[in-house]
Image (spheres, rainbow, N blue to C red):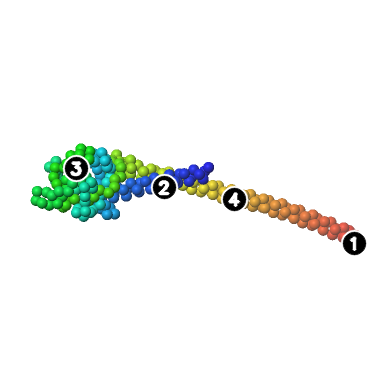
Amino acid sequence: MKKALNIIKTTIVWLVVALAVFMMIFTIISVTTFNRNDRNLFGYRVYIVNSDSMSKTDFNAGDLILVKEVDPSTLKEGDIITYMSQNTESFGETITHKIRRLTTDAEGNPGFITYGTTTDTDDETVVTYPYILGKYEHSIPKVGTFFNFLKTPQGYIVCIFVPFMLLILYQGINCIHLFRRYKKEQMEEMEAEKAKIEAERAESAKMMAELQALKAQLENKAAVDADKSVSETEKAEQQGV
């Protein structure tokens, strides 16, 4: 059971580490790539959809869309393109709409009439080739919403700060446990060493007592032998007389 709990705990820690690292990498890539006309990711420009003008058929506000650079002359009716808007109300904004038909502007430049499928209303101006950024390829639902949340203080705290703080707290608790275990083992070693010394002292005292007893025994035997020798001497002298 203890081994299983350790495995579960280790797995959770590594998941938190992976999540925190992923959030950092995602944030860096997002800030440097998303909604940037001068940047691309693996050949794609990445944009966050800000309106529901295409929600009826293709993607919604908050989705992430991938746009690939193409030759404008290869585009056709029904393609969805991303372009820099020249409309009065949205001048300079990045727009992704569907091509209704091919046409030319007032100066004879080739371009497209575009529209949002939700309103089915043609855009104000003709989209000519120089303003086209690419052709819509794929969308990833709600990733843009998540990224916008991640850019807020609340998103940073929840997705990056909290995981790292949990890791720091976990490592701090581990350090305390390791220190306590070290102190406990150190005390146990000291107690064991003390017990060993006491045992050696007791053994030495026992040996000393045995030596003292042996010494006393030898001294008694020597005294007895001396007395016996004196007695035999005196007896011999008496017999000689």
**In the rendered image, which quarter is residue 95 located in?**
top left
Q: Residue at x 77, y 55 (%)?
A: 221
Which image quarter: residue 164?
top left
* Mark 3–mark 4 distance (CA, rounded to whole Å): 91 Å
N-term-proximal mark, 1 vs 2: 2
Residue 58, image x and y in percent? Answer: 27, 42
Q: Residue furthest top?
A: 119
Q: Which residue is painted at 26% across and 41% down in the image?
A: 57
Residue bearing mark 4 = 196
* Marks 3,4: beta carbons within 8 A: no
- In the picture of the structure, the residue carrying the numbered disc 2 is 14
* Residue ID for mark 3: 115
Kindly identify the amino acid type of the residue bearing the numbered disc 1. Answer: Gly
Q: Residue 116: x, y in percent?
A: 21, 41
State which tag comes first along the sequence, 2 or 4: 2
Tell me the SS state at disc 1.
helix
191 and 96: which is toward the camera: 96
Residue 166: image x %, image y %? 38, 43
Q: Nearer the viewer, residue 241 or 27?
A: 27
**Circle nearer the viewer, 3 or 4:** 3
Q: CA distance from mark 4 to mark 1?
A: 65 Å
> What's the CA distance linking mark 2 and mark 3?
48 Å
Of labels 4 and 1, the one closer to you:
4
Residue sitting at x 52%, y 48%: 185
Element at badge 2?
Answer: helix
- Numbered circle sitting on residue 197: none
Q: Is residue 129 visible?
A: yes
